[in-house]
Amino acid sequence: MNKIIILLLTLFISTVSFCQKIETVYLDKKDSTANMYVAVVPQNGQINSFMFLLDGFGNYSPKDLLIKTELPKYAAQQNILTIIPILKTGPLYFGSDTASQQSLKELIEFVAAKYKLQGKDFYIGGFSIGGTCVVKYSELAIQNNYPIKPKAVFAVDPPLDWQRFYNTAKRVVRLSNPGQVNEEVTYMIDRIKKEMGGTPETALENFYNNSPYSFSDTTQRAIKPLIKTPIMIISEPDIYWWLSQRGYDYSYINITDQAAMINELQKLGNDKAILVTTTNKGYRKPNNERHPHSWSIADPEQTIKWLQSQK
């Protein structure tokens, strides 16, 4: 079975590559695990704009994203260069932390110089932690006046509020039978506490400064830079799947952050902040395993058209 899957993956990548050129670039020749990217270049060589796509936590190979979504394929057909990076912080990156953000900024500026992209529209999108990362980058790019700012941003089911995530993860543990808690839950509790230098009770300012959005921060400091930026959050809040397959309710899934953030942005005057929810679109390739937290909920053609429609 594994041999068949590998063969299918090889054939799929070969088919995708026929429509565009695939380049792999290592910024540190001594390290093939991080600080690198895969570039999906339009076959005709014409680049009208460029896009960064950041995968979720634990992605060790950027080329895997070519299996998970056809976004790079559709982008290439529209003469959009797609960059799929692994940051200096590696596949287990936290996304919104200072080191990841600095690495992303450096990569974007490196790519813009290498491919002579100055003045061209720049789009950025990500899945899960990758979505966390790109929303935070977009906020900082505007707040700190980076030389390259996104024309439009999209994120696929990202966690946005680390205070909410930490508190509800602790609740999941409390409500679960001992020994039956998903390891990812306990890992994230420890990881968030480490990244924030404490808990919401002891280091709340760090949670506010690090999170792309904070429900309890009435100053709205994180999201105010995005008042004029087109941003689309895509989610599939299949609560019946989460309840039956994971034992999670609405408090622990990311839709709570996403809807609240978009609502606040709209109330602040951003009429280009939208939340897109899907039904029965979440299937993880190549096995088409049902999972609402998947790249597949972002329709490639619709997403690219939305990005290009932003003025």
Image (tube, rainbow, N blue to C red):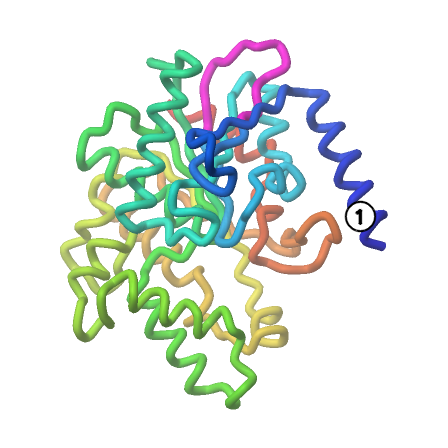
Q: Residues within 10 Å of mark 1 (few under 14, many from 20)?
A: few
Q: Position of residue 279 (x, y in %)?
A: 61, 55
Q: Quadrant of the N terminus?
A: bottom right
- Pick the front one: 86 or 215: 86
Q: Outermost residue toward the bottom?
A: 177
The part of the chain drawn in magenta is 39-51
**In the image, is residue 115 above or below residue 247?**
above
Q: Tell me what residue is drawn at x 48 percent, y 30 percent.
A: 26
**In the image, is residue 181 above or below residue 141?**
below
**In the image, is residue 226 above or below residue 280?**
above
Quarter of the rendering containing residue 161: bottom left
Q: Tell me what residue is drawn at x 50 percent, y 27 percent.
A: 25
Q: Tell me what residue is drawn at x 61 percent, y 37 percent.
A: 63
Q: Tell me what residue is drawn at x 58 percent, y 30 percent.
A: 72
Q: Outermost residue toward the front?
A: 30
Q: Position of residue 12 (x, y in %)?
A: 75, 35
Side (left or right) of 115 relative to 214: right
Q: Secondary structure at mark 1?
A: helix
**In the image, is residue 217 above or below residue 30?**
below
Quarter of the rendering containing residue 153: top left
